[in-house]
Image (cartoon, helix red, strand yellow):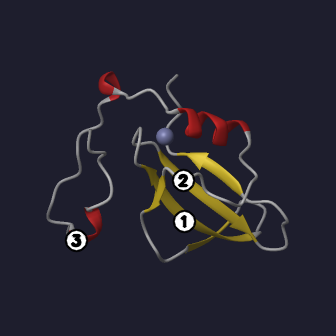
């Protein structure tokens, strides 16, 4: 099965986004479940592909700056955001949607 991500770099904003379809949710693969259980590790699992190569800067509610990278799993299509906060030892991985088991 070909995941939804990967070749999206060339897409333009003229292409409408896919409709949200929670009914066809794919169960998260083992690596994604493992990442959800250990969201502070820096190393992405081998199944994750980087989606945007430019870190997106932002600021948390408490004013801490961070940069965010978006990854997409080649196996189950789960989209992950990697938050890397300034002055913090650990990163945090946050799935775009709650994982389906
Ligand atoms: Zn996965």
Q: Secondary structure at mark 2?
A: loop
Query: Which residue is at the front of the view, 50 or 22?
Result: 50
Q: Nearer the viewer, mark 1 or mark 2?
A: 2
Q: Which residue is mark 3?
A: 10
**In this image, 57 relative to 27: left or right?**
right
Residue 46: image tag: 2
Residue at image position (76%, 68%) is 63
Task: Give the mark nearer the N terminus: 3 vs 1.
Answer: 3
> Furthest-left residue in view?
14
Disc 1 crowd, CA 10 A, few/some/many (<14, 14-19, 20+): some
Q: In which quadrant of the rendered view does residue 6 lie?
A: bottom left
The CA distance from mark 2 to mark 3 is: 23 Å
Query: Which residue is at the front of the view, 88 or 13?
Result: 88
- Labelled pair 2, 3 in contact (Cβ < 8 Å): no
Residue 39 at what x, y percent from top left?
Answer: 71, 46
Residue 69: image tag: 1
Q: Secondary structure at mark 1?
A: strand
The CA distance from mark 3 to mark 1 is: 18 Å
**In this image, 4 relative to 66: left or right?**
left
Residue 40 at what x, y percent from top left?
Answer: 76, 52
Image quadrant containing the N terminus:
top left
Residue at image position (26%, 44%) is 2
Task: Give the mark nearer the N terminus: 1 vs 2.
Answer: 2
Q: Secondary structure at mark 3?
A: helix
């Amino acid at each position: 099965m070909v995941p939804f991500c990967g070749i999206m770099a060339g897409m333009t904003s003229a292409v409408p986004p896919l409709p949200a379809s929670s009914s066809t949710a794919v169960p998260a693969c083992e690596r994604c479940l493992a990442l959800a259980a250990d969201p502070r590790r820096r190393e992405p699992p081998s199944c994750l592909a980087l989606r945007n190569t430019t870190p997106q800067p932002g600021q948390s509610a408490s004013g801490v700056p961070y940069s965010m990278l978006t990854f997409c799993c080649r196996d189950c299509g789960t989209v992950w955001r990697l938050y890397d906060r300034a002055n913090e030892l650990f990163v945090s991985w946050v799935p775009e949607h709650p994982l389906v088991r």
